[in-house]
Image (spheres, grey):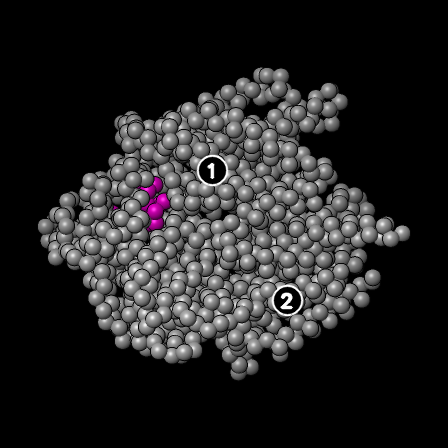
Amino acid sequence: MLIELILNGLIIGCIYALIAVGLTLIFGVMRIINMCHGDLVMLGMYASIILYEKYSILPYFSAILLQPFFLLLGALIYKLIDHIPLKQREMNSLILTLGVSFVISTSVMLIFSADYRTVTLPFSQEVLQLGVIRIGYPYVISSAFSIVIIVLFYYLIMRTKIGRAIRAVASDPETASTLGIDIKKISFLTYSIGVSLASIAGCIISPILYAYPFVGGIFIIKAFVIVVLGGMGSIHGAFLGALLLGVGESLIIPYFEHSMKDLFAFILFILFLLFKPTGIFGGKSRV
Amino acid sequence: MDIRKKIVIVSIIYLCVLLLPFFINMQEHKYLMDIFLHLNLALTLANSWNILGGFAGQVSFGHAGFVGIGAYTVALLVHYLKLSCWTALLFSGFFSCCIALFLGLLTLKLRGPYFALATLATAEIAKIIVVGARSFTMGTQGVAVEKTPLLGSENYLVFLFLFALMLSFISIISSLLIRYSKTGYFFIAIRESENATMAAGINVFKYKVIALLISGYLAGAYGGILAIHTGFVDPESAFDISRTVEPIFISYIGGVGTVIGPIIGSLLLVPIGEVLRTEFTTAHLLFYGIMLILFATFFPKGLAGLIKLGARKNVAKNK
Amino acid sequence: MKKTLILLLFLMIFLLANNSYAQEVFKIGSPLPLTGAGAAFGEKFKKAYQMAIDEINSKGGLNGKKLELVMEDTQAKPTLAVTAAKKLMESDKVIALVGGWSSGVALAVAPFANENKIPYLLDHPALDDITRKGYGYVFRLQPTTGMYGAALESFLLKQVYPKEKKKLKVAYLYVDNAFGQGVAKYGILAFLDKNKDKFDLVIKEAYDEKALDYKPLILKVKSANPDIIILTSYLTDGILLAKQFKELGITAKIISGTGAGHSMQDIYEKSGGAVEGYFTSGPWHGNINDPKWKEWRKKWEAKYGYIPGEHEVEGYVAIYVLAEALKSVKAKDVNSQRQQLRDALSKIDMKTIFGRIKFENFDGYTNQNKAYSLTSLSQWQKGKLLQVWPKEIAEAQPKY
């Protein structure tokens, strides 16, 4: 049972990571907390469900197909954030993205009603059997998909010119701007990448979970915990934090009452906030 | 206008409202009185949030936690100690205040968004504990709050109304007193620049704790009144996230960091909200969201700021 | 500035002070979740009420008066529900309140209705406590949470246990909310406790409705290897549990839900058929051998395009129960009308498509329909929910 639990935790962790990495990146570069991140995930879920129902496009393909739409949406939200004077940005962006979260979730409710939605893929009942361990194919594919995306993302951040610029802005905006980096452009790019990651996460979650207009609230809270665990702004941290949370939750449930399971996450959250706000890796490094 | 004048004006308005029951038969207009009650409650909560988030600049995402604690204080005191719900009400703000103190000692070292996230988490922790401590709190089954007659009268709605009125009065007066006192200036200094305030030799932590205590007291008392009003408390409704969102919403639209902001905000939004809720059941949250985006982005000073701007233009024109 | 404030205040008073007019219709108020997570259920009741009301009105109404439904959104929140009930009572001057869907809402509205002497008819909020507080104005026509499992219990005792002739291991998972706690406390756990010699409760767990992943919990169940698994679930959690049961290869002789999520058509479709073979015990859909029921079902399918379940039957019948009682309401002013309605309700004894409705006081309950017999055990067989127990109303043989 222990191996199964750990494996399950890792799979869930991979998916958490995809959500949390975007959130932490946006925080690292722009110093804002994106309250509508969970709703963007939800939007990804709905979009992929609709595409599957109408045109039977598998959610994994819609994850890529939908990108132009989400990049546009990201740009729109970014424009709003950019409009806030720099001095008030830290707090007002919180409120602004909260408003965006309301608008997204309520619009979805008005259009698609509050009904729960799921997709049932042709292979959704198929199970991969490894000895005694059983994993459903949707889980296998989703976690593999999110690992691929995260590797690509790592490459983008660590090895490309844009990535270097993003890291530079995150660690020291002033120096970065004296070096000729256009901070606005980098912020814009970062926000778009974050939104895009959230939407991909939504698409690949839809085969394994249900969607309803307010499901974003569940994701955002998990993502906050992970981001703080890993150190706000740290990408390695977010990935490790996600796996840690996934495995931790998985291991704790059989031994505690089920309704207490989130207590573990939140207490870790507070402890890290208080005593180690730089996260697991510590130090000052961001991104 | 100096602060004394303002206090007198507020008091006069409240006295007028206090006379209302003589003109309106409360027993026949329970719904109307209920809206007034909610108006006063919303005003209290908005002031509570604004003192902490608007004046002292410590944005809280955890007001639902204070409200929930206040509500459960009343419910459990009535349930276990068989106290009259009105006596229990006096404890609700106090107990919530204690929790706020504890929370403050833990989290107020954190800054800006970190503090906001910490309050969010503590509110969730409080809720999980209430759900999990089933044998004591009845968990998700909730607790009924039996109403008890006060001074031999069973006019619960009138009492609730009076208590809510008193609470909102206290909240406005505290808001005024803080804004125009040294404490208030320190609050604002902390909001503008914590480092500079600290450098000026001011005990930043102390003033943050003060703001949190006042805020916690008002929010807790709010929860207590709500518990008596509903007559039933369960984790889902006591720790409802809308208790966090509503005061932020009202403060931002009215004008965050001003005394008048929450007043304008709640006077405008509570009736509008009620009409929207009853007329366009599904769409009201959409309206809230759009307003929030508009005000956070384009009118960060809220309606109060707009009115001031309008007045200034008028003056300029007349000159 | 001050003037504006004062003006605003007065404006509000005028805006909100509603004009009252003489009542040409019987207004029935319903606090329902029309937005938020419960909206899908609110919709079901809305349809059911409207159908019944349209039928009655097209036949000329009651004593020449038409029925009218006034709904208020509660978002399934007790606090909003109390305000909504006040509005229904005063602005709309409704003669009775009906429904509410969730137990939390009903727990808040019931004392209010009782205090203000408005009859309140419950058609779905099932928590036992609501009719155990001696409220003279609160009536409930459907089984309480404690009764939900009645059909399953008799099935286990009379059919399963005699065949097995050994102590059976039971795992019980229930959703951690008022409904789940009620079914557990007054129903399943009480039953298992009474029959300790026959059933061995190996796992008992209240789970969080909003979890993303139930696998760790299911692995725990798997390692205990139970013969019988009983679930009390809503829809989303029910779907996830069913999918993940299948994925992890849970094999128990009997897996049974207790109404709610497991009785909804959605669970079969949205779990991709993972609930095939599941039992579910709860308020029945009505006596399916009754020709009136068959006729009604056809009408419903023609109008709304899907097969009605327990919610639709309960809502539809609730309006007819009120209509029957309203026949003897003759008074002019609304307060005496409410009084007369209450008296009429407490005398009611009628046959409906849901079953016999008679409000009685027994075992600590007040004005509660003795609805033990209005529960049935159904089973998902090839995508259809067929009643399999008790034998008198069985459409199919139970397969296990």
Quarter the C terminus of chain C occupies: top left
| A120 sits to left or right of B277 | left
Q: Residue at x 69, y 73 (%)?
A: B16
Observer-nearest residue: A69 or C187?
Answer: A69
Observer-nearest residue: A177 or C143?
Answer: C143
Q: Amino acid at mark 1?
A: Met
Query: Helix or strand or loop: what does disc 1 sit on?
Result: helix
Q: Which stretch appears magenta?
A: C228-242
Q: Amino acid at mark 2?
A: Leu
Q: Residue at x 54, y 19 (%)?
A: A155
Residue beneath disc 2: B167
Residue beneath disc 1: A42
Subunit bearing disc 2: B
User: Taking the image as drawn, is residue C293 in sight?
Assistant: yes
Q: In the rendered structure, does residue C332 fall within the stretch colored magenta? A: no
Q: Is residue B224 above or below residue B124?
A: below
